[in-house]
Image (tube, rainbow, N blue to C red):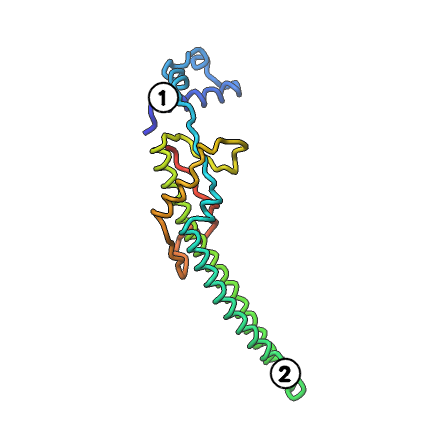
Amino acid sequence: MPSSSLKTRLALAVLAGMVSFGVVPAQAQQQEPPPAAADAQVNLPPAVVGIIDYQKILRDAKAASSIRQQVEARRKAYQDEITGQEQRLREQDQALAKQRTVLSPEAFATKRREFEKEVAEVQRRVQERRRQLDEVTAVALNEVREAIIQVVSQLAEVKGFNLVVPSSTVLVFSPRIDVTSDVLMALDQRLPDVKVAEAAPVGSAAGGTVPASPEPKPQ
């Protein structure tokens, strides 16, 4: 449930928008803002900011490193399989070319269509493998991102931060408020490894567009 002060601020925001368009009833224009709204604005706490290097955390975290290793191993296995299929298709193509002089035009055209159909099927399987690998990678990395949010939230509560922002969005800051190493240490303890699934779960975020990072949760 929104607090009474929050409801008042929302009401004032709507009222201000109505004034800008000249549609405020006369009675509303004559009303004074409730004292509680002014008090709430005066009593807002000052920002206590923490800084994290988000990309460094994603790069150096043990869980992220384990994901990269699994994905690269799977990608190599896929590539080896694709290379074998490409070699087999090349050999079939060469054999078919040699049969052109001994087959009737109709028979050659039939074999050529069958060969091209097989080539298209191999290409479809290759694209499907790549898509599946991208999806399971995104699901695994999303698990790391969610853990980062949890760790940062807990660390912010311990250190008294009410705002934590990525260093990439800040021009200048003191190293004393950089808690990247603390987040990395806590993250490695909480989530040292993530298993990359064989296939993305049905209805997972990876089936659509996966966000670069989850929205931070308010403190």
* Residue 197 placement (x, y as % from top left): 39, 59
Alpha-carbon span between mark 2 and mark 1 = 83 Å
| Residue ID for mark 1 | 5
Q: Is residue 60 left or right of residue 159?
A: right
Corner quadrant of residue 180 = top left
Residue appearing at x 47%, y 17% in the figure: 24
Name which of mark 2 and mark 1 comes first in the sequence: 1
The quadrant the C terminus occupies is top left
Find the residue positioned furthest to the right: 101
Residue drawn at x 43%, y 30% is 49
Residue 71 placement, left or right of 192: right
- The residue depicted at 43 percent of the width and 59 percent of the height is 70
Residue type at mark 1? Ser
Residue 25 in picture, x, y percent from top left: 46, 16
Q: Which residue is mark 2?
A: 106
> Going by the image, does 182 lie left or right of 168?
left
The disc labelled 2 sits on which kind of residue? Glu
Q: Which quadrant holds residue 181?
A: top left
Find residue 146 and report its image quarter. Answer: top left
